[in-house]
Amino acid sequence: MDEKMTVSCGNVFEDLGFSPEDAAAMQVRETLLIALEKELRKRGKTQRELAAELGVSRSRISEVLHHKTDRFSADKLVGLLHRAGKRVELRVD
């Protein structure tokens, strides 16, 4: 069986056919959400406890932990990371 391998352009969303502009925005949100999700899981607390710490509803914490990237803007994710005590740095190439 011959398998064809496609080389990625570096952004999975662009590889999936999204415009470069949309793919870049999606990649930013995905990166921020993953960082927030890792931080929250590391704390080992209930969703209710995490929600109280970050000042959001438990359902918002559930959306983070269930990776609902489309439910968050980059601004909201940066704010939540800040509330979680994380610093966000931006690099543009």
Image (cartoon, grey):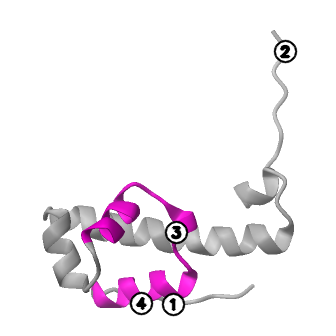
**Left or right: 19 with respect to 22?**
right
Residue at left 51%, top 90%?
Answer: 89
Is residue 82 shown in magenta? Answer: yes
Residue 55 left/right relative to 22: left
Which amino acid, mark 2? Answer: Asp
Q: CA distance from mark 1 to mark 4?
A: 13 Å
The quadrant of the picture occupied by the C terminus is: bottom right
Q: Is residue 42 above or below residue 72?
A: above
Quarter the N terminus occupies: top right
Residue that carries the numbered disc 4 in the rendered image: 79
Q: List the residue tagged with mark 1.
A: 89
Earlier in the chain: of badge 3 and badge 2, it is 2
To which residue does mark 3 refer? 71
Residue at the image position 82 percent from the left and 46 percent from the top: 7
Q: Are marks 3 and 2 in contact (CB under 8 Å)?
A: no
Residue 47 on image: x %, y %: 20, 64
